[in-house]
Image (cartoon, rainbow, N blue to C red):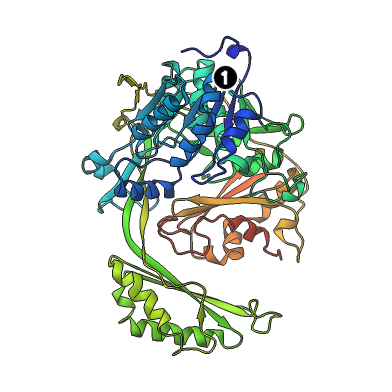
């Protein structure tokens, strides 16, 4: 099915209505009712979500998808069909066929004719043994020896484009990349070729900006004081993608939040690594992105260059980590270290020693003992245990902690009731040869359409890498000032690694960052990173530096015991550091 007749003369308006599994349920209706859009998309899948869906499916084999998406379809599907709005979602998770069937049931109840297709080819579980030699850990190089719970390759946008071209009104995807939700509809709308690298790269950037919903419109934004009316719910973003791959990021008129160069820069720096951002369809050069304010709540994105699609495909594997449990003890007033030591010693003596557990993590967070209120004067002792023995990590541990209530340090109390252990997963990223992936579109009549793969041989790209020559005098914090007095930051997780992007408003600020903020300085400013590898990437086009802190998050969010397991607050912590 071809796009509307006017599509070659205008940009396609692609709206986002979800940034994660649990986002605002009303967002789909807000985007459909709030103004003109051509495509409604949403992102439900994070690395953690795949493990959650696995647990869901073990309880009921018919599940394994994001059920909140179906609630949204109840609200908007009839309107979407009436107005010709396409719906593209990755809510299919581990069971896209089952999710697609549920959408068809909703359409039947609503009395509308909807062609619902789904995509397959990401699920590699049946082939793990054959692929095991390729599945070394992406960061550590360790061989995969454990049994996998899930193994899903990241698919690109061409399956989505194929489904839309074949007449789908709704496309239910499994583990596609977040940006693919914009790349696919853009390629379909404009009729791009598999090797339109620059256009595809532009769509990847647009997709990366809108994939996390309101993080592009003021959410998690360091300069949040710029938001005109914080009392209004933030509007979800829209990417207007033109035929040349350039785009304008905006939102529906009258919605809360804002779209400016700062909010867009913040999201561009979220969860990235090097300047060459690999997607299944193209390698996007983030150091070629150009941003310009294009009116109120409109940011133009252009100049993006792309390289041929990578020869490998990333695979998200989840392993069984066992069981975990945590108890937190309050330590009020003086002698917090001594109280913590007594508690720790007595607790593990009662449990038969730390060696009975696979892992024990004990963290003391001290508080000023003479603070104004009792709460402010109370430290916290967090004790986390992991074990393959559910009983040991469960009530055996938490009950032993409670049994000490009258038999340990003065002022003993805990912040929560004793509970059972919870299962947790270990995230294992890997790469496989892209030729191993056989992506197909499945239409409602059962017809299976093979998805063409992009060429992956290296071809020339004559565009020079972005280089912004500037003789600006560096301007930044002086001794005693915080980094946040001059700069903004955005941080996040990529498996076991964390990234922190920090940026300035202008050339002078970037010159200061470039000259002063080295990996060694970041290690000094962030004690948690002092013994870890820190990688720095310069993005002068965005007045930004990106730092990747390797291994900060251990084996991923589902497994690690860190205070901030997804590094969401790490950027704000860096901004709070005093220079000098």
Drawn side of residue 198 relative to residue 420, left or right: right
Q: Is residue 291 above or below residue 429?
A: above
Q: Looking at the image, can residue 507 be seen?
A: yes
Tell me: 575 left or right of 398.
right
Q: In the displayed structure, would residue 509 be above or below residue 330? A: above
Residue 180 percent location from the top left of the image: 48, 31
| Residue lying at the far top of the rendered structure | 5
Q: Is residue 465 visible?
A: no
345, above or below 513, in the image: below
Q: Is residue 376 above or below residue 511?
A: below
Tally the marks.
Answer: 1
Front-most of residues 502 and 563: 563
- Image quarter (top left, top right, bottom left or bottom right) of the C terminus: bottom right
* Residue 353 drawn at (x, y percent): 32, 81
SS at mark 1?
Answer: helix
In the image, 364 versus 521, the foreground residue is: 364
Quarter of the image where one finds residue 468: top right
| x and y percentages locating residue 329 in the rendered image | 50, 78
Q: Residue at x 54, y 56 (%)?
A: 567
Q: Residues within 10 Å of mark 1 (few under 14, many from 20)?
A: few
Q: At x 44% / y 54%, what residue is drawn?
A: 496
Residue at the far left in the pictured view? 130
Q: Residue at x 30, y 76 (%)?
A: 355
Tell me the residue at 34%/77% (across/down): 354
Task: Name the residue beneath numbered marker 1.
Answer: 83
Picture coordinates of residue 51 (x, y %)? 37, 49
| 362 or 117: nearer the viewer | 117
């Amino acid at each position: 099915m071809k796009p509307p007749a006017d599509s070659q003369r205008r940009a396609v308006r692609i709206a986002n209505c979800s940034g994660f599994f649990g986002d605002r349920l009303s967002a789909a209706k807000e985007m459909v009712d709030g103004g003109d859009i051509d495509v409604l998309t949403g992102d439900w899948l994070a690395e953690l979500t795949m493990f959650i869906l696995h647990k869901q499916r073990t309880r009921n084999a018919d599940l394994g998808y994001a059920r909140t998406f179906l609630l949204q379809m109840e609200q908007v599907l009839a309107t979407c069909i009436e107005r010709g709005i396409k719906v593209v979602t990755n809510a299919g998770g581990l069971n896209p066929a089952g999710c697609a069937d549920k959408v068809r049931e909703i359409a039947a109840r609503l009395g509308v004719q909807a062609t619902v297709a789904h995509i397959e080819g990401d699920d590699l579980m049946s082939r793990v043994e054959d692929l095991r030699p390729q599945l070394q850990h992406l960061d550590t190089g360790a061989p995969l020896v454990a049994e996998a719970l899930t193994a899903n390759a990241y698919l690109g946008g061409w399956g989505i484009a194929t489904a839309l071209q074949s007449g789908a009104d709704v496309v239910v995807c499994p583990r596609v990349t977040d940006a693919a939700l914009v790349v696919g509809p853009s390629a379909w709308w404009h009729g791009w070729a598999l090797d339109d690298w620059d256009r595809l790269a532009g769509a990847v950037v647009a997709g990366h900006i809108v994939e996390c919903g309101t993080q592009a419109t003021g959410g998690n934004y360091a300069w949040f004081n710029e938001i005109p009316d914080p009392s209004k719910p933030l509007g979800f973003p829209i990417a207007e993608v033109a035929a040349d791959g350039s785009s304008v990021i905006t939102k529906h008129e009258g919605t809360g939040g804002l779209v400016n160069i700062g909010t867009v820069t913040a999201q561009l720096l979220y969860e990235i690594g090097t300047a060459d951002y690999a997607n299944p369809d193209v390698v996007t050069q983030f150091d070629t992105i150009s941003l310009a304010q294009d009116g109120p709540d409109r940011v133009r994105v252009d100049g993006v260059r792309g390289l041929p699609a990578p020869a490998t495909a990333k695979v998200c594997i989840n392993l069984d980590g066992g069981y975990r449990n945590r108890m937190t003890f309050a330590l009020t007033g003086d002698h917090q270290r001594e109280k913590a030591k007594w508690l720790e010693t007595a607790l593990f003596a009662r449990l038969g020693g730390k060696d009975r557990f696979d892992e024990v993590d004990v963290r003391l967070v001290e508080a000023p003992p003479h603070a104004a209120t009792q709460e402010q004067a109370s430290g916290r002792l967090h004790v986390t245990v992991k074990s393959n023995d559910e009983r040991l990590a469960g009530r055996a541990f938490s009950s032993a902690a409670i049994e000490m209530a009258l038999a340990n340090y003065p002022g003993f109390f805990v912040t929560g009731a004793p509970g059972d252990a919870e299962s947790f997963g270990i995230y294992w990223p890997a790469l496989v040869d892209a030729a191993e992936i056989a992506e197909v579109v499945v239409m409602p009549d059962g017809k299976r359409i093979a998805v063409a793969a992009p060429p992956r041989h290296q071809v020339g790209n004559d565009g020079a890498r972005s280089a912004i020559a500037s003789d600006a005098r560096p301007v930044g914090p002086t001794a005693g000032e915080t980094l946040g007095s001059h700069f903004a930051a955005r941080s996040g997780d990529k498996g076991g690694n964390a990234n922190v992007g920090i940026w300035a408003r202008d050339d002078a600020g970037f010159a200061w960052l470039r000259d002063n903020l080295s990996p060694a300085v970041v290690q000094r400013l962030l004690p948690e990173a002092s013994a870890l590898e820190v990688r720095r990437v310069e993005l002068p086009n965005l007045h930004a530096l990106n730092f990747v802190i390797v291994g900060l998050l251990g084996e991923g969010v589902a497994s690690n015991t860190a205070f901030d397991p997804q590094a969401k607050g790490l950027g704000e912590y860096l901004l709070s550091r005093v220079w000098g």
